[in-house]
Amino acid sequence: MRILISFFCLLLASHAVADYPDKPIKIIVPFAAGAGTDAVARFTAVKLEAQLKQPVIVENRVGASGAIGTQFVAGSAPDGYTLLFVASPFTTVAAATPTVANYDPIKQFAPIALIAAGPLVWIANAQAPFTTMREMIAFAQANPGKLAYGSAGAGGVNHLALELFKLKTGSDILHVPYKGVAPATTDLLGGSIALLTGSIPAVLPHVKGGKARALAVTGDKRSPLMPEVPTMKEAGANGTEVYNYWGLVAPVGTPAAIVNRLNAEVQKFLAQKDVQERLAGDGVDLTPGGPDRLAAFIANDYNGWKKLVIDAKLKVE
């Protein structure tokens, strides 16, 4: 009897996978609507909906630097109908504030696809007493604690980018956490803080308008959106490369057939010209590949940030 029941359950499961998807799919974005990650998630949802012939709904569940929405997906049924749209805080918050995050980015999720990755850019207030990254480093070393840097919140990628920079350059810069990059940018333009890192599309208008100075991009190559801006290595801050990324994951235990189906659909839309143009306009590189590529990226990112937390003796509240 037990064998018959097990066989029947297996048969039902195989039919569920074969018929996937036969109802709406929900993508959880653990950040506010209108933010950069949210915009790309909605763009992704539109593409998947057209290809899968089922509604793909984006739902924002915000709080705790992304941990609230992430915890929700970790506890959801592993059936392919509740997915998580991840960005850099997925790994940085878990590494820097594990008790607050309360999730394991490696053990509790099944990677689906890495969509894109790209650098941040360091910018300074236009009135700051330096015009280059090398000059900023020298000023910070000579004036410990006198420069203020704004981030999108403690434990986020902007915050850890600063801590990595401080560790590698021996600089003492004050960290000022905000509830997002937007209010931090407002204060930088107003002169309340001197520095921040942000996505290239978000800060480019301020740089072009002369209200901010771009010091360096955090990737290993210059950005075509601002080719005159050096990389961190070129600017004298080697070893401080940082990348933002976007991807899709599901709760651990999601059938491999569903994960592979979703990955195939992502690869399909990444090959489309309008998607390539859209993401190029965001200053990021498309990252096609199987679930294993995202798995490796997450593991490398998470372990790297955990090492920074240990090496810098960070205590993030």
Image: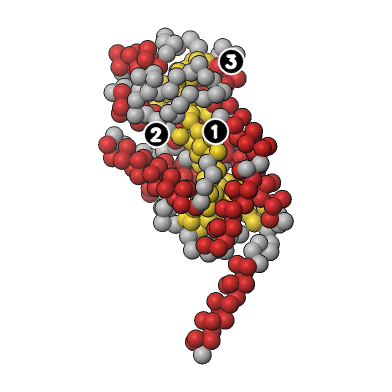
Instruction: Identify residue type, mark 1.
Output: Val
In this picture, residue 180 sits left or right of residue 317: right
- Return the disc, 1 or 3, that comes first in the chain's sequence: 3
Query: Is residue 36 visible to the viewer in this orientation of the structure?
Result: yes
The answer to whether residue 105 is left or right of residue 17 is: left
Label of residue 208 in the image: 3
Classify mark 1: residues with Cα within 10 Å, few (<14), some (14-19) or many (20+): many
Q: Quadrant of residue 44?
A: top right
Q: Type of residue at label 3? A: Lys
> Which is nearer the eye, 115 or 152?
115
Image height of 309 relative to 224, above or below: below
Q: Residue at x 61, y 29 (%)?
A: 281
Give x and y (percent) for residue 123.
48, 20
Q: CA distance from mark 3 to mark 2?
A: 26 Å
Q: Nearer the viewer, mark 2 or mark 1?
A: 1
Name the residue located 51 percent from the left edge and 28 percent from the top edge: 198
Is tag 3's residue or tag 2's residue first in the polypeptide sequence? 2
In contact (CB < 8 Å): disc 1 and disc 3: no
The residue indicated by pointer 1 is: 284
> What amino acid is labelled 2 in the image?
Leu
Number of the front mark, 1 or 3 = 1
**In the rendered image, which residue does mark 2 sit on?**
160
Q: Position of residue 33 (x, y in %)?
A: 62, 40
> Which label belongs to residue 157?
none
